[in-house]
């Protein structure tokens, strides 16, 4: 059934696409090692964050936190803000996003298109600063509704009840689940669900490694670990730099025809490393990875062009 | 046989301890030894990385891009050619 009552109702049930050319070749007689990409850009506003945003707003409405005409406040590096902006527009809320100033121009344009107001936080410190500024604003404006994706259990629950089950239904033979680590909601929710179904599934985090500016905290106490994060859900965690992420996102485009956002490059890089480990060990693997969004809102960085270089991302929050 | 020499990348926030050096090195066969060796060279650095004998909450350390917390933490082994990166914990997007 592909008919829906509204745009929001079309959330989720995104396709899981095989990557036959990127999957490594195995020796004759050895089990297959296959990569599968879950295309989360096929959500209402084009990213996995639609799951988080709709779940958080539904929950806040149900618990009476969110009343008609209310103002929502959220720290975001882009996608969650974009998802919230669409839902807020349709359901009649106002939205204020706190976003680091070193993000691509498209994110500002899309947020403003759906009527969100943006307060910029300083580049140095990246999303840590956006979180800090948003928490201050929330304390100063108690009438605003602070959904707070980094600590809102509805974020994790959205992935536990949708992303995880969708993957397991499409790929019951899954051996590895690889996703990005930001709010940690995807890995915590889908990871926990998959583990419950089969404790042998490896839950792998791919974390973007930014340029030095983003790590330019005032002091170590300004570090940040999302409240949702539970280390015990994860098996291994990789840090992937801009160079490898850009190389992989271009490879995904060239080899499989999939046009993805930059954070997907980091996830694919980790997934290909795991695929190689499986081939070397002679073990079969079905590796599911998340394509968080498409590349449209990163075109202005120039990285997709023939001469596009990852160095342009040095001071930017690219994932 | 002597321990391998390990290259360590230092984040901006900790460079006041390393005479502003971005990359330093020390001999070690595991992470605990590495941190001790670094602390002997750069006084005070160890205390910025550890608290009550554990990695500080807002410090992440990677061996060849993999988080040491999932490799045995301070017991994570090091071999010749390994590269270690220290970073403060920051929030991300997706």
Image (cartoon, rainbow, N blue to C red):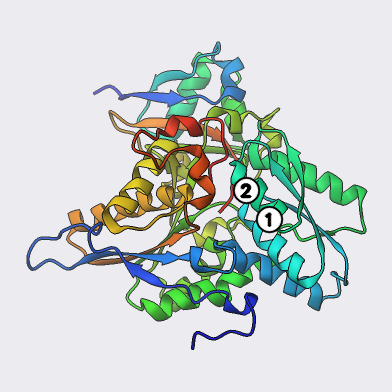
Residue A40, position in %: x, y?
Answer: 49, 65
Give the residue drawn at x 25%, y 56%: A22
Q: Nearer the viewer, residue A57 or A295?
A: A295
Instruction: Report, in whole angstroms, how far the alpha carbon at label 1 lies from the one at label 2.
Output: 9 Å
Q: Residue furthest top?
A: B19
Q: Secondary structure at mark 1?
A: helix
The reply to whether callout 1 and callout 2 are in contact (CB within 8 Å) is yes
Residue B10 in view of the camera: yes
Residue at (53, 20) in percent of width and height = B39
In the rendered view, would you say A297 is above or below A178?
A: above
Q: Is residue A13 left or right of residue A138?
A: left
Per the image, the residue denoted by label 1 is A81
Q: Earlier in the sequence, mark 1 or mark 2?
A: 1
Q: What subunit carries mark 2?
A: A
Quarter of image, res B43: top right
Q: Is residue A251 left or right of residue A189?
A: left
Q: Which residue is mark 2?
A: A107
Residue drawn at (60%, 68%), measured in percent from left and top? A51
Q: Which type of secondary structure does the marked residue at label 2 adopt?
A: helix
Look at discs 1 and 2 and give the one toward the viewer.
Answer: 2
Residue A302: x and y, percent? Answer: 46, 38
Residue plotted at (54% across, 86% down): A3
- As drawn, the residue found furthest toward the front would be A113
In the visual, does A96 lie left or right of B8? right
Whole-percent x and y of residue A227?
Answer: 68, 55
Instruction: Mark 1: give few (<14), some (14-19) or many (20+) Cα within 10 Å.
Output: many
Rendering quarter of residue A20: bottom left
Tag 1 subunit: A
Q: Residue A84, how many percent across, how many down?
A: 70, 62
Camera-side residue of A5 and A242 = A5
């Amino acid at each position: 059934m592909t008919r829906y009552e509204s745009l929001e109702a079309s959330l989720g049930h995104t396709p899981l696409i095989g990557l036959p050319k990127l999957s490594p070749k195995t020796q004759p007689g050895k089990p297959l090692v296959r990569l599968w990409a879950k295309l989360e850009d096929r959500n209402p506003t084009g990213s996995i964050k639609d799951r988080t945003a709709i779940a958080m707003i539904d929950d806040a409405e149900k618990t009476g936190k969110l009343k008609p005409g209310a103002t929502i406040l959220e720290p975001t590096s882009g996608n969650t803000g974009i998802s919230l902006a669409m839902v807020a527009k349709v359901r009649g809320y106002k939205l204020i996003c706190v976003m680091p100033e070193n993000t691509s121009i498209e994110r500002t344009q899309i947020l403003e298109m759906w009527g969100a107001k943006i307060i910029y936080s300083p580049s140095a410190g990246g999303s840590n600063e956006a979180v800090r500024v948003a928490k201050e604003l929330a304390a100063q404006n108690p009438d605003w509704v602070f959904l707070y994706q980094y600590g809102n259990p509805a974020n994790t629950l959205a992935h536990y009840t949708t992303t995880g089950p969708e993957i397991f239904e499409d790929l019951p033979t899954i051996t590895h689940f690889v996703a990005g680590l930001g709010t940690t909601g995807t890995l915590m929710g889908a990871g926990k669900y998959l583990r419950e179904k089969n404790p042998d599934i490896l839950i792998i985090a791919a974390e973007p490694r930014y340029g030095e500016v983003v790590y330019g905290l005032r002091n170590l106490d300004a570090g940040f670990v999302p409240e949702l994060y539970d280390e015990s859900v994860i098996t291994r965690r990789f840090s992937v730099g801009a160079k490898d992420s850009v190389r992989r996102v271009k490879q995904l485009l060239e080899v499989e025809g999939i046009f993805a956002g930059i954070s997907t490059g980091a996830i694919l890089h980790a997934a290909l490393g795991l695929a190689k480990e499986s081939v070397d060990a002679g073990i079969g693997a079905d590796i599911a990875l998340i394509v968080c969004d498409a590349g449209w809102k990163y075109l202005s960085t120039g990285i997709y062009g023939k001469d596009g270089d990852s160095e342009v991302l040095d001071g930017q929050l690219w994932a | 046989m002597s321990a391998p020499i390990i290259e360590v990348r230092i984040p901006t926030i900790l460079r006041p301890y390393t005479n502003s050096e971005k990359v330093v090195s020390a001999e070690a066969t595991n992470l605990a030894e590495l941190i001790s060796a670094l602390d002997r060279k750069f006084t005070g650095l160890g205390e910025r990385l550890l608290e009550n004998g554990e990695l500080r909450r807002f410090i992440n350390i990677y061996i060849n891009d993999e988080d040491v917390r999932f490799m045995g933490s301070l017991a994570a082994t090091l071999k010749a050619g390994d590269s270690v990166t220290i970073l403060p914990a920051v929030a991300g997007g997706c």
